Image: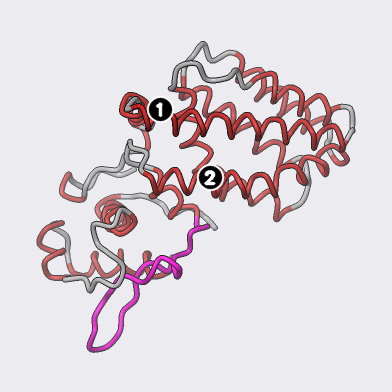
Amino acid sequence: MTPYARRGVHGQTVEVLARRILGGEIPEGATLDLVALQSELDVSLTALRESLKVLAAKGMVDARQKRGTFVRTRAEWNLLDVDVLRWQFEGGRTSEADEALLRNLAEVRAIIEPAAVRLAADRRTDADLAALDGALDAMGEGGGDAAHAVEADLAFHRALLAATHNELLERMEMVIESGLAHRDRIVHSAPHSEDPVPAHRAVLDAVRDRDPRAAEAAMRALLDQAGRDLDRLGDADDTGDAGDVATADAADAGDSHVPDATEGSRSQ
């Protein structure tokens, strides 16, 4: 599940097409006009076809004789693919579909992370504790900087999964990370968000004490706090305050913005 390398015109073309499909601008079942896309995006037909091969590998498009290249139904998309997740969340806005996906992610985390932290409490090493301590220290040193808070939170959860010493669970960070980063950017940019340090410290203390039951309880409390953060996000949307949050999110996500293919072939 290695992330797609975003480089040059080819990489930008993949992302432009992916976001149009994911955003519904190119709807499910639509047949792509390759000649028109080639002209609009100012790319060679070869580059366009290579880009579509990437999306085909992720279940988003297919090609058939007499029909051409078309968008597959959402049920056929590889929604757990790290790039598909990232493409859905990037763009500086939080749509209704994004919020639904965030809640799906919360349910996945509620299944995976409490069980994972029990293993971490049993199997953690001194190196694991050092990584968790470092992430927690960084979480408390951000000074209100949302980007710093996001990276510290991601580092903590990566370290927790690594402490399970289970290869498959460690790979789950690639599934969780894109959505968690998007959620964190919104939450940490919003006013009156809860301090994340105490809840994370409770998890770490239980892991340090090799207490699986306490670690699971602490993780469930942390996830409950994350759920309250999402509820506040929904309340902000209802009162019309979500625009300010989305604007802050877009600013924090600036380093992950990929320009349209017509903006040039800058390497990334």
Residue 128 is situated, as x and y percent measured from the top left of the image, at 77, 33
Left or right, 15 with reference to 80: left
Assign the C terminus to one quadrant of the image: top left
Residue lying at 41% horizontally and 65% vertically, measured from the top left: 74
In front of the other: 106 or 119: 106
In front of the other: 192 or 173: 192
> How dense is the environment of label 1, judged by Cα within 10 Å: few (below 14), some, or many (20 and up)?
some
Residue lying at 58% horizontally and 26% vertically, measured from the top left: 152
Report how far apart the C-alphas of labels 2 and 1 lie in the structure: 16 Å
Assign the N terminus to one quadrant of the image: bottom right
Task: Give amino acid for label 2.
Answer: Arg
Q: Is 76 included in the stretch rendered in magenta? A: yes
In front of the other: 248 or 224: 224
Task: Give amino acid for label 1.
Answer: Ala
Identify residue for label 2: 103
Residue lying at 26% horizontally and 76% vertically, measured from the top left: 69
Identify residue for label 1: 236
Residue lying at 77% horizontally and 30% vertically, measured from the top left: 218
Q: Residue furthest bottom?
A: 66
Left or right, 254 with reference to 196: left
Query: Element under label 1?
Result: helix
Up-down relation of residue 176 to residue 31 (above or below): above
Residue 257 is situated, as x and y percent measured from the top left of the image, at 32, 38
In front of the other: 193 or 91: 193
Magenta highlight range: 59-81
Left or right, 146 with reference to 216: left
Res. 177 image quadrant: top right
Q: Residue furthest top?
A: 143
Up-down relation of residue 124 to residue 44 (above or below): above
Up-down relation of residue 31 to residue 101 (above or below): below
Please tell me which of labels 2 and 1 falls first in the chain: 2
Query: Element under label 2?
Result: helix
